[in-house]
Amino acid sequence: MFTSWRVVAWNGRPAEMSESRKVWLWSAALALGCSLVVVVLFSASEYQWHWDSIWQRRELIARGWVATALISLAALVLSIVFALLLMAGQRSRVLPMCLFARGVVEIVRGTPLLVQLLVGYYIVANQLHLNARAPVGIVILALFEGAYLAEIFRGALESIGASQLEAARAVGFDRRQTWRFVILPQAMRRALPGTAGQLVSLVKDSSLLSVIAVDELTHVVQAANAAAYTGLEGFVPLMLLYLALTLPLSWWARRLEARFKYET
C-alpha cells in the first residue's frame, strides 16, 4: 500500500519516499482523522464531560500505565520462553512429553483468559498459598499468550521444505550451520507477522488482570472513575495510553519484518 507513494525532489524529479517515512505519514494521517471523528462525536454527544475530576487523578493513572508497561514486558519475555518450551515439547520424540505439551496448548487455547485468571488465582494460587496477585497474573497471561506463540513458531518451522535441508547438506552445512543460515532466518521471517499480532494482543489482554485486582491501567482507571463519580471520562485516556504501548510495538515489528525480508 505504501510502495506506490512518491515525493518530488528539489530538482523536479520524483524520488522514492523511505518506508519509515511512509509509515509515519500514514500513522499521522490516521491519528488526525481519528481525532477529528472523536471531536465531532464529543461535540454532538449530550453527555456532560467532567475532565477536571480525571485530571486530578492523573498521577494515579500514570502509575497504572507504568505498571501495565512493566507487566506486559515481563509477560512478553516469559511468554516467549513458554512458547519455545511448548514448541520443543510438541516436536519431541518422547511421547509423554509430546502429549503433555500438546494437551497444555489445546487446553489453554480452548478456554477464555478470564476463566484462566479466575481459576488460576482464586483456586490454584490460593491452594499453593501464593497471594502475590501481579506475579501470578503475569505467569497466567504469559502461559496464555505462549500457547498461541508456540503454534506460530511450530508452524513457521514446519513450513520449511525438505528441499531447503537437502540443499544445505549439499553445500556442506552441518546441523548448526543449517539451523543458523537456512532454517532460523526463514522461520523467523514467516513467524514475525503472527508474533507481532500476538504480542500486541498480550498488551491489550493485560487489562483482564483487573479481575484479580492487579493495579494495572484498566483497574486504576476504573477506580478513578468510581472515586470521581464519572462514567466515560477515564476510558478516553485509557484508549490513548494503550495505543501508546501497542503502536510502537507494531512499528518495531514492521521494521523487523523489513530487515529479515532483506536478509533472506
Image (cartoon, rainbow, N blue to C red):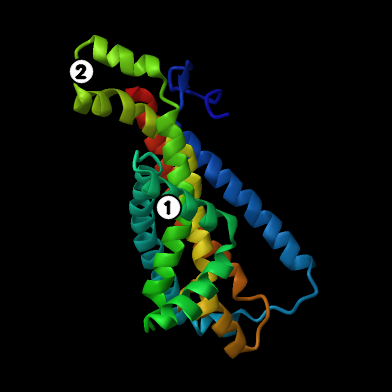
Is 207 rendered above or below residue 186? below
Residue lying at the far top of the rendered structure: 170
User: Could you tell me the amino acid type at mark 2?
Assistant: Phe
Kindly indicate the quadrant of the structure image that contains residue 174. top left
Q: Is residue 166 visible?
A: yes
* x, y percent for residue 217: 49, 72
Q: Is residue 250 visible?
A: no
Seen at 35% across and 41% down, the residue is 92
Mark 2 or 1: in front is 1
Location of the N terminus (image quadrant)? top right
Classify mark 2: helix, strand or loop: loop
Kindly indicate the quadrant of the structure image that contains residue 5. top right
Is 34 rendered above or below residue 193? below
Seen at 34% across and 58% down, the residue is 78
| Residue 62 numbered tag | none
Kindly indicate the quadrant of the structure image that contains residue 233. bottom right
Identify the residue under disc 1: 100
* x, y percent for residue 186: 37, 27
Tell me, yes or no, whether the two marked residues, 2 and 1, touch with CB atoms within 8 Å.
no
Is 212 rendered above or below residue 66? below
* x, y percent for residue 208: 54, 69
Identify the residue under disc 2: 173
